[in-house]
Structures are given as C-alpha cells and as structure tokens.
Image (tube, helix red, strand yellow):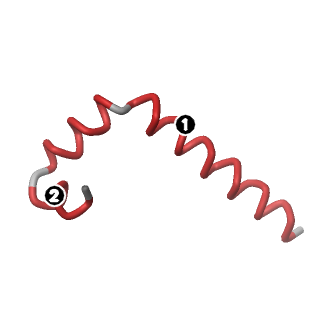
C-alpha cells in the first residue's frame, strides 16, 4: 500500500476513506500504546 500510495496520493486518500473506521481504530490503539509506554518511562 505504501509504495502504491507514494506513486499516487489519491490511492492513499481513497484507502483511508473506504477504511476510515479501521484507520481510526488503529490510530487510537497506537496512541494508547504510546501513552502507556511514555507513562512507564516516568
């Protein structure tokens, strides 16, 4: 997906639109993990 999107930004936009719920959930999961990891450093 990344190589294809690099060649045509419309592809990345279309992918995100079609998979918006999954993309949103993935970002939330990543943010949660990062927040936990940062908190563990304190």
Q: Going 35% across and 33% down the picture, which residue do you hit?
A: 19
User: Label 1 neighbourhood size at 10 Å, few (<14), some (14-19), many (20+)?
Assistant: few
Q: Which residue is mark 1?
A: 25
Q: Position of residue 6 (x, y in %)?
A: 17, 60
Q: Position of residue 34 (x, y in %)?
A: 68, 58
Please, which residue is most extreme toward the bottom here?
Answer: 41
Figure label count? 2
Left or right side of 3 for 17: right
Residue 14 image-quadrant placement: top left
User: Label 2 neighbourhood size at 10 Å, few (<14), some (14-19), many (20+)?
Assistant: few
SS for tag 1?
Answer: helix
Q: Going 25% across and 56% down the picture, which residue do you hit?
A: 1
In the rendered image, the vertical position of residue 21 relative to residue 9, given as above or below: above
Q: Position of residue 20 (x, y in %)?
A: 39, 30
Residue 42 image-quadrant placement: bottom right
Evaluate if marks 1 and 2 touch, with contact meaning CB atoms under 8 Å apart.
no
Q: Going 77% across and 63% down the picture, which residue do you hit?
A: 38
Left or right side of 15 for 30: right
Identify the disc placed on residue 14: none
Please tell me which of labels 1 and 2 falls first in the chain: 2
Q: Which residue is mark 2?
A: 4
Residue 18 image-quadrant placement: top left
The residues tagged by marks 1 and 2 sit, at their Cα atoms, a distance apart of 22 Å
SS for tag 2?
Answer: helix
Q: Going 84% across and 71% down the picture, which residue do you hit?
A: 41
Left or right side of 22 for 2: left
């Amino acid at each position: 997906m990344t190589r294809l999107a690099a060649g045509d930004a419309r592809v990345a936009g279309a992918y995100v639109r079609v998979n918006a719920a999954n993309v949103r959930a993935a970002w939330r999961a990543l943010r949660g993990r990062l927040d936990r990891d940062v908190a563990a450093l304190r």
